[in-house]
Amino acid sequence: MRALVPMAEALEEIGPLPDGVSVELWDARGDPPGGGDGVDLWVPPFPPIPDYAIPLSKLPQLRVIQMLTAGYDHIRPYVPDGVTLCNAAGVHDGPVAEWVLAALLAIARRLPAYVHQQVSGSTAREQSDSLIGKTVLIAGYGGIGQAVERRLAGFEVDVIRVASRAREGVHGPEDLLELLPRADVVVLALPLSDRTHHLVNAEFLARLPDGAIVVNAARGAVVDQDALESELKRERLRAALDVTTPDPLSPDDSLRKLPQLLYTPHVAGATTLTLPRVFGLVGDQIRRRHAGEPLLNVVAGPHDLGPAHPAHPAHPAHPADSGESAS
């Protein structure tokens, strides 16, 4: 069984592998080492590349794509029939939730302004806001959203939960617009799809009360940035963005200059825990694949993949010939 990973650090973190498994480095540029024949599992690099069709065309026997991210909207349209796509759900929940709390506290307590004062030498003091007593609406109550709520415990906030479907204690998307006037904070932790593209538009923002904070830890395109910029320029709303369109923002983007905005260049999940945790998952997936066990975090494609090491490895079957169909 052959697997390709995008960086040398992966080889240190994936852990022991069974005999017969070969793991090689490939950053999706140029040709795969030794050619792409026989590559069963591929880990694409991060940040995302412009066109996944090119590297995928070089891996004719590929059966599994293991992402380093929870989001997979950027690669899903390119996944061939018969190939299973797995994401890294759960790996980044804690670090991203920490960033959400850090951003919220920084905005509420005016920390960016005091950082500027530290450099300028100013000693001006003003009252700050507080999270105490606020209502926090979490849009996207999956792993990250739940991790955010756990970290909000103790801050004396009320939490409104919104997910893709209603269930006990959790609202469905049909309730979202009616809930917004109650929200002092909106945390975006939902996947990008046709339904969520520019979900946060002018109407959405207009329903929020004055002074509300919008925190985007999801995908840049979930937010209509022109509509958000308009509200920020009026100083009616505040925002924290870790993801944008484009991502990252260009150095001269007008959003960067707005004091109502706290911006970080897609680093919410980038901590010292990231590589050990994400490549630990990759190692687990490789071992599962080799043993014929169910893979974790399957988000598209067949669940039952058959053997990772066919009886005639010199002539492995192409996924299209396996008789399996995408679910």
Image: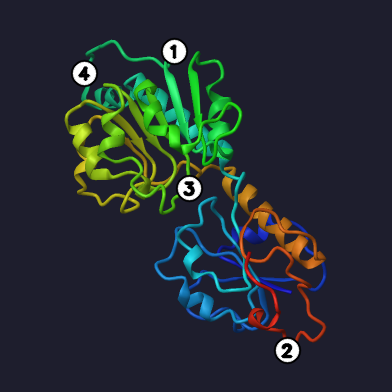
Q: Quadrant of residue 67?
A: bottom right
- The residue wearing badge 1 is 132
Q: From the viewer's perspective, is the residue at label 1 or at label 3 nearer?
A: 3
Q: CA distance from mark 2 to mark 3?
A: 39 Å
**Residue at 72% in and 63% down:** 286
Upstream in the sequence, badge 1 or badge 3?
1
- The residue wearing badge 4 is 122
Upstream in the sequence, badge 1 or badge 4?
4
**What is the x, y in percent for residue 104?**
41, 26
Q: Quadrant of residue 142?
A: top right
Q: CA distance from mark 1 to mark 2?
A: 64 Å
* Secondary element at image label 3: loop
Residue count near mark 1 (Cα–Cα under 10 Å), binned few <14, some 14–19, many ≥20:
few
* Secondary element at image label 1: loop
For this rendering, which residue is in front, 56 or 281? 56
Give the residue at the far left of this rendering.
234
**Could you tell me if the residues under marks 1 and 3 are in contact, i.e. CB atoms within 8 Å?**
no
Q: Amino acid at mark 1?
A: Ile
Residue count near mark 2 (Cα–Cα under 10 Å), binned few <14, some 14–19, many ≥20:
few
Q: From the viewer's perspective, is the residue at label 2 or at label 4 nearer?
A: 2
Up the image or down, 216 lies above or below 24; here it is above
Q: From the viewer's perspective, is the residue at label 4 or at label 3 nearer?
A: 3
**What is the x, y in percent for residue 116?**
26, 27
Q: CA distance from mark 1 to mark 3?
A: 28 Å
**Could you tell me if the residues under marks 1 and 4 are in contact, i.e. CB atoms within 8 Å?**
no
Q: Which of the image's four quarters has the C terminus?
A: bottom right
